[in-house]
Amino acid sequence: MESRAERLTGDAGVMLLRELDERLGLTSSLGESLIDRRNQELIRYTLTELLRQRIYGFAQGYRHQDDLDRTAHDPAMRLAVWEGGGEDALEERLSSQPTQSRLLDTMAIKHNLEETRNALSGWPERFVKASGQERKLMAATLDTDSFPMEVFGRQEGGRYNGHFRLTVYHPLVASLAPNGSYDDIRLGEGFLHAILRSGEVHTAAGALRFIRNAVSRAKRFARTVDVRMDAGFMIGRVMDGLCDDKIRFVGRLASNPVLERRAEPYLKRPVGRPPAEGYERVVELGLYQAEGWKYAQRLLLVVVDRPDLKTGQLSLWPDHFFLLTNWTPERR
């Protein structure tokens, strides 16, 4: 075999991505659902091919659009992305960075944004059904999070956020954890639902509606769905709304003097030498209901007392935090 530059690649694994993609019909299903306003007589690449090139590039570690110019001639990328079969793909080149920039304009169409959001839940559903012989998951947990996405220049929606001290977008995302674990063999961690928000909004802004939509999407392929939340979402209107919908949740509760007084009797170390590996225990503190909440919730104290990895010494006081949940003690 003749070794020529145009036939050498460092991204042979992308062919496995195409094989999996093809079996599950992921990018093809999304590409076919999008509105394409380009003049069809003047285009060279279908939306599905452009999506493959961008998604496969991300999967191979190419984060920037400029990287696409370097991989446009890569033989493995060309074979994986090109719609037609055979070696004819080796005579073609993939799209350039400006073409991929125009793809972003196409994806920004309102209909296409909604179809892309639907794909976040549709793709895991296809995977679950394919790997589980068309059976639903017995249980799934949704982790609801927000995080900052730093923006530069004058991008629309970018705002200064005092908490992060950055100009950011502040999106909401729901990650799927089958059976409560990210290590489940049937499906790894992945976003199931996401929305982009302006940078200055509070963590819980729009959270109740977002969680309801995420749970509805997850129920298409999971028999029961629970929600885990960070402290920023543990406010009355969110928790009360989830209780009204009979959605089970657990979340971390920010500490306050009232909680600390209830926890104080359980923070003392037991008499005797502690185990070498330390310990972790959960203590029921009864019901807790702040002013303005419609429902009282179970309050749990989690005490973690583990030695420092370097010194092997315990801290002066055990670490602890609070969880709030509407699970009944009998259920979990």
Image (cartoon, grey):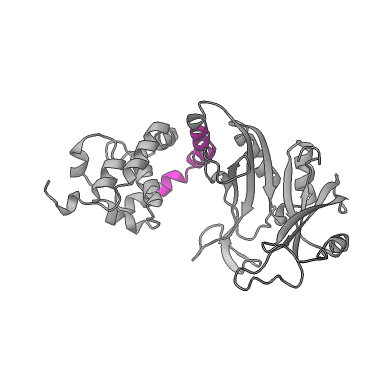
Kindly report the secondary structure that dominates the magenta region of the rendered protein: helix
268 lies left or right of 152? right
- For the image, the number of numbered tags is 0
The percent position of residue 270, horizontal first and vertical second, equals 82, 63
> Quadrant of the image for the C terminus?
top right
Q: Which residue is nearer to you in this view: 50 or 249? A: 249
On whether residue 97 falls in the magenta region, the answer is no
User: Which residue is nearer to you in this view: 154 or 139?
Assistant: 139
Q: Is residue 29 left or right of residue 191?
A: left
Position of residue 183 measured from the top left corner of the image (x, y, whole percent): 55, 45
Query: In terms of depth relative to the viewer, which is nearer, 287 or 175?
Result: 287
Q: Provide residue 56's location: percent of width, then percent of height.
A: 37, 47
Q: Which residues are magenta?
A: 104-128
Report the residue that reaches farthest toward the front: 272
- Residue 126 is a magenta residue: yes
Residue 290 appears in the picture as rendered = yes
Q: Position of residue 230 (x, y in %)?
A: 69, 54
Image check: 72 left or right of 330?
left
Residue lying farthest to the top in this orientation? 134
| Up-down relation of residue 164 to residue 227 (above or below) | below
Q: For this view, does 177 lie left or right of residue 204?
A: left
Residue at 88 percent across and 59 percent down: it is 262
Do we see residue 288 in this rendering? Answer: no
